[in-house]
Image: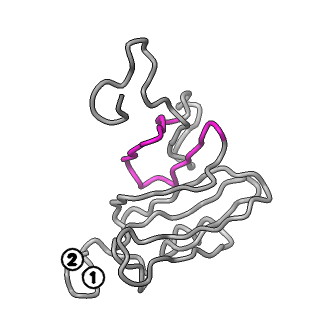
């Protein structure tokens, strides 16, 4: 079976790619009681697309938070629609968050730094994180970066050119 094209269930009705968790919008404009399923199902090979104008996306996995998470193929306007991802973690969890260029030819990584509020994450250049001990949510801003380098690190606009003057 395939998680993409073709049948989604086997002959017995079992899904080829069962849900591993859920993703949904969170924030003051979203009433959790109107979403009894807890959001959209997430499978092993999920592709998530949707609005980014809310407060944040909340990712909850059935077996607990990820120890490692790869997010790629990001297409989001960095100025008009900041995209923030929230993931629940236990208190006392330590974090090491790093961005990696897909096809690197120079500076290949950027290590994120901790800040003291989710507002700082939303307003950041996309290389910060915040853990809210009261809600037990880790917040990171998801941005679109060049695929071949990460320096200089900045919040790239969709019409920015790369270091050689070509479109990113």
Q: Nearer the viewer, residue 109 or 143?
A: 109
Q: Which mark is residue 91?
A: none
Neighbour tally class for label 1: few under 14, some 14-19, many 20 plus, Cα within 10 Å: few
Residue 80: where, in percent of width, then height? 36, 65
Neighbour tally class for label 2: few under 14, some 14-19, many 20 plus, Cα within 10 Å: few
Residue visible at 56% across and 63% down in the picture: 140
Q: Answer with left or right where residue 90 lies relative to residue 100.
A: right
Toward which corner of the image does residue 129 lie, by quadrant? bottom right
Q: Which mark is residue 162?
A: 1
Farthest-out residue, left: 166
Residue visible at 73% across and 64% down in the picture: 94
Residue visible at 44% across and 63% down in the picture: 82
Toward which corner of the image does residue 33 lie, by quadrant? top right
Farthest-out residue, top: 12
Residue 96: where, in percent of width, then height? 64, 68
Q: In the rendered image, which quarter contains the C terminus? A: bottom left
Between the residue at mark 1 and the residue at mark 2, the CA separation in whole angstroms equals 6 Å
Toward which corner of the image does residue 131 lie, by quadrant? bottom right
The magenta region covers 39-63
Q: Which mark is residue 167?
A: 2
* On screen, residue 13 above or below 112: above
Name the main secondary structure of what is drawn in magenta.
Answer: loop
Q: Mark 1 touching mark 2, by CB under 8 A?
A: yes
Residue 127: where, in percent of width, then height? 53, 74
Badge 1 element: loop
């Amino acid at each position: 079976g395939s998680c993409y094209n073709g049948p989604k269930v086997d002959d017995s009705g079992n899904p080829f790619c069962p849900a591993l968790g859920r993703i949904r919008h969170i924030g003051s404009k979203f009433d959790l009681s109107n979403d009894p399923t807890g959001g959209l199902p997430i499978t092993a090979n999920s592709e998530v697309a949707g609005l980014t104008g809310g407060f944040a996306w909340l990712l909850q996995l059935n077996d607990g938070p990820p120890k490692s998470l790869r997010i790629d193929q990001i297409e989001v306007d960095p100025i008009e629609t900041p995209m923030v991802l929230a993931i629940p973690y236990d208190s006392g969890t330590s974090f090491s968050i790093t961005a990696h260029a897909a096809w690197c030819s120079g500076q290949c990584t950027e290590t994120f730094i901790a800040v003291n509020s989710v507002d700082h994450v939303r307003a950041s250049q996309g290389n910060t994180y915040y853990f809210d001990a009261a809600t037990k949510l880790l917040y990171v801003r998801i941005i679109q970066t060049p695929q071949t380098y990460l320096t200089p690190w900045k919040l790239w606009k969709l019409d920015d050119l790369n270091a050689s003057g070509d479109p990113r």
